[in-house]
Amino acid sequence: MGQIAHGTLNRTPSQIGAYLLDTLFSGYPKRDLQVRLWDGSTWGASSEPRFTLVLKHPGALREMLLPADELTLAEAYLCDDFDIEGNIEAALDLAEYLLEHSNRTLRQNLILADILRKLPAKRVTRPGRQKASLQGELHSKDRDRQAISYHYDLPADFFALWLDQSLQYSAAYFSEGPDMDLDSAQRHKLDYVCKKLRLRSGDRLLDIGCGWGGLLIHAAACYGAETVGITLSVPQAELARQRIREAQVNERCRVEVCDYRDLEADQPFDKIVSIGMFEHVGEAQLREYFAGAWSRLRPGGVFLNSGIARAFHNPGQEPSFIEKYVFPDGELVPLHVSLGAAERCGFEVRDVESLREHYALTLRHWVHRLEDHAEQARRITDETTYRVWRLYMAASEHRFWSGQLNLYQLLLAKPLEGKSGMPLTRTDWYVA
């Protein structure tokens, strides 16, 4: 490597690029990629690659790999230093290899870094979505509102391009197998949640982080529940109210813009559910979160909490692309941390179910649907926003398949004089 490196300055940028690709990818076990350089020349698979890495200018590799971390690589994609054509999920295997699985020695890495620095710098900040810049104390009510607004206040038409008809922005339930269509799988999810809650006509249901109201509408229309949803996003609440009126369940549904810490506890709920909001709470606030649910739940009631958890052996990486561009202040904790916080607040853990593969399948649908509507997504938002969502959802799918992330539904009971009120089996969850 050293002898070749000494002669790189006398080579063309394309020759340097090809040399770097040979070196960077020499140990990569898969041969499913092609690289197309800025001058049209190609490297790698000659036919039917699963994806093509498109380097847009002579300094693209420099922008991608100096420094070699997740955020640098992601920002190079957002700034169009490179593009990914074809299967972006397959490209995540390569990204992980570049960041974590190289077998080069320290000396080889130093030589590579020196060559990369000699490439021209050409970083152009793109218009559109920028890094989150939140103000105030971490997880204060005002800062949490800023974080929710940053992610969820995009036009609803953007989300509607790739979500199902009920606008469920959480994992579907592929109860009939991986080939289910997304709309059917999301309807099964709504029913599965209601069955786990053992929802009955007249039950008062609180949905913490209700999104665009899909579960509220389903619980009211199909189970006769009296539903209340809370969200910090004003645009979400406005659309949820519109959809409730259109479904003609407005007498049994209402949505409030409210922090979970501010909800009145004077009228306890029979059932509480939270799906996809838990990731925004923060580890330091878990006790307050579960204590709030406990105080708002009648004795004998149950709380279904569905949230993403990181694997115990996976502490996460810094800096994080998703933290900067997708979910600012989001925190994922291992399962035992959330279970401990719930139990310390008095809850009895009645069921824990992993739905990891279901979330991976859901994300695959979302990525493909977004890609199918790429031009519309760009018109509704901008190129950078489209790239952020494409990358974040593909990366999340990769992490669910690999086991770095998991999704757990916790069913927590508030016993009445020691009685949980729960049947002896789960049979009724699976009976139509």
Image (cartoon, helix red, strand yellow):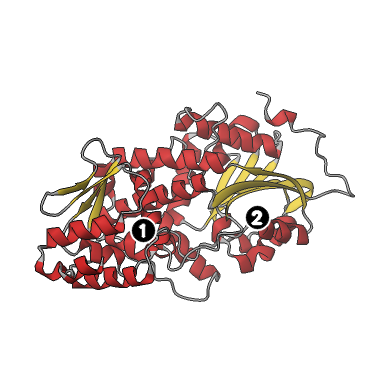
Residue 354: x %, y % from top left: 62, 43
Say which residue appears at 51% left-offset and 35% top-offset: 186
Res. 292 image quadrant: bottom right
N-terminal of the pair, mark 1 or mark 2, is 1
Q: Quadrant of residue 140?
A: bottom right
Q: Residue furthest right?
A: 417
Q: Is residue 50 left or right of residue 429?
A: left
Q: Which mark is residue 181?
A: none
* Residue linked to disc 2: 335
Instruction: Please tell me which residue lies in front, 155 or 276.
Output: 276
The residue at 40%/53% (across/down) is: 392
**Amino acid bearing label 1:** Leu
| Neighbour tally class for label 1: few under 14, some 14-19, many 20 plus, Cα within 10 Å | some
> Label 2: how many residues lie within 10 Å, few (<14), some (14-19) or many (20+)?
some
Q: Position of residue 91 (x, y in %)?
A: 34, 48
Look at 82% across and 34% down and name the residue there.
424
Indicate left or right for 155 with 47 as reference. right
Please say if the residues under marks 1 and 2 sit with CB atoms less than 8 Å apart. Answer: no
* Tag in front: 1 or 2: 1
Q: What residue would you read off at disc 1?
A: 98
User: How many numbered discs?
Assistant: 2
Amino acid on which the number 2 mark rests in the picture: Leu
